[in-house]
Image (cartoon, helix red, strand yellow):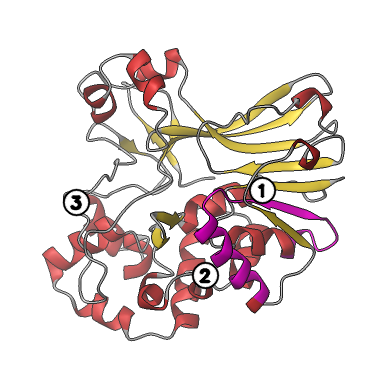
Amino acid sequence: MRLRSVESPHRPVFAGYLPRFSSQELDARLLRVPWHLATLLYPPNILLHIDKYGSDRWTDYLGLSSGSRLALHLECLRSLGFSQKTIDAIGLVDRSRFVPATMEWAAHLNWSIPIDAGSCLSNPVLVSAMTEWLPDLIDGNIIEIGSGSGFHTAILRHLYPDNLIITYEANRAVSELGCRNLEKHGYSNIVQHTRLAPDDFGRQTGLRIETRMPSIVEGVDFDNLRPECTWIAPRLLSQGEYNAFPSNGKLRKTFTSYGEYALANTSRECVLHRSVHDGESFVELSRLYSVVFVEQLTEVTPGKIDPQNTELDKLINSNGKMVQI
């Protein structure tokens, strides 16, 4: 994806899919593209624009209809290099239908949204990245682990109308919310559970997609999965990947050793991977570094976005250099 690479001498090349721009980078982008593409509808970039130029553009954005905001979001996805297949799939599912009514104004920002019982709806660009990796056809059932509000489940249903989708959400309140959302919007042939059962898996599984850490489920025999089964999930950094991060960066300051990082089992600095089962084991084909599955807002009112003093883990550090912008 042409606009999603970040280069740094201190770490491997990785996909910083939503960079926080510097003041100079934002100004350079504003000379070439409209406000929504310059900021990528990413709250830290919107805040920077407000600090530099005032809140008129933000106020105008809040005055748009949900459909118009969705159209701007899809333009951002296109500018990030996503395929038309992904853009069409995201466009078919209105994210504002899967968030609390009080958060509809933020539904098409590139930010995760609190939904219920401490759970969040993942950043739409992250959902788009997972969607981008999906195969055109799946031979077998689809297992989704961590289905949350049902947003990505609905996208899967549009992409694979004939496959059985089995979802798992451990949080019962969130699971019930997801069920209501899917039923309300007419999505069918979806079996939902609040616990994993061995019978959910086996040679009928053609796609396994999950958002939880760790990405290994106890008691599941991966050797029994269908050959060519695709697995999309987060994983921890390897020792070598951890060592490649700058010693003075946030990751290494937070976790002073790899053992400490591994024990924390964090989903704030992990790797999203795409792997395919070759009949004997999974082979990793793609990876996305510095994934953040949950970003919280301290202010959730339409008039203000304030990510200060939160657990934001920046997707590029101060040494990162954007390429192909």
Q: CA distance from mark 3 to mark 1?
A: 41 Å
Judge by depth and name the residue closer to the eye, 244 or 292: 292
Instruction: Indicate yes or no whether the magenta region holds residue 14.
Output: no
Residue at image point 75% right, 61% down: 190
Instruction: Indicate yes or no whether the magenta region holds residue 172.
Output: yes
Q: Which mark is residue 251?
A: none
Is 45 rendered above or below residue 319? below
Is 103 rendered above or below residue 59? above
Q: CA distance from mark 1 to mark 2?
A: 17 Å
**Image quarter (top left, top right, bottom left or bottom right) of the N terminus:** top right
Q: Using residue 229 as the reference point, say whether residue 16 is left or right of it.
A: left
Residue at image point 26% right, 35% down: 317
Residue 135 percent coordinates (x, y):
75, 46
Looking at the rendered structure, the secondary structure element under dot 2 is helix
Judge by depth and name the residue closer to the eye, 196 or 148: 196
Check whether the beta carbons of the residues at disc 1 and disc 2 lie within 8 A of each other: no
Residue assigned mark 2: 98
Residue at image point 72% right, 40% down: 197
Residue assigned mark 1: 144
Residue assigned mark 3: 24
Q: Quadrant of residue 315?
A: top left
Q: Quadrant of residue 13?
A: top left
> In the rendered structure, which amino acid carries the disc numbered 2?
Phe
Residue 88 percent coordinates (x, y):
65, 66
Pick whichever of labels 2 and 3 is earlier in the sequence. 3
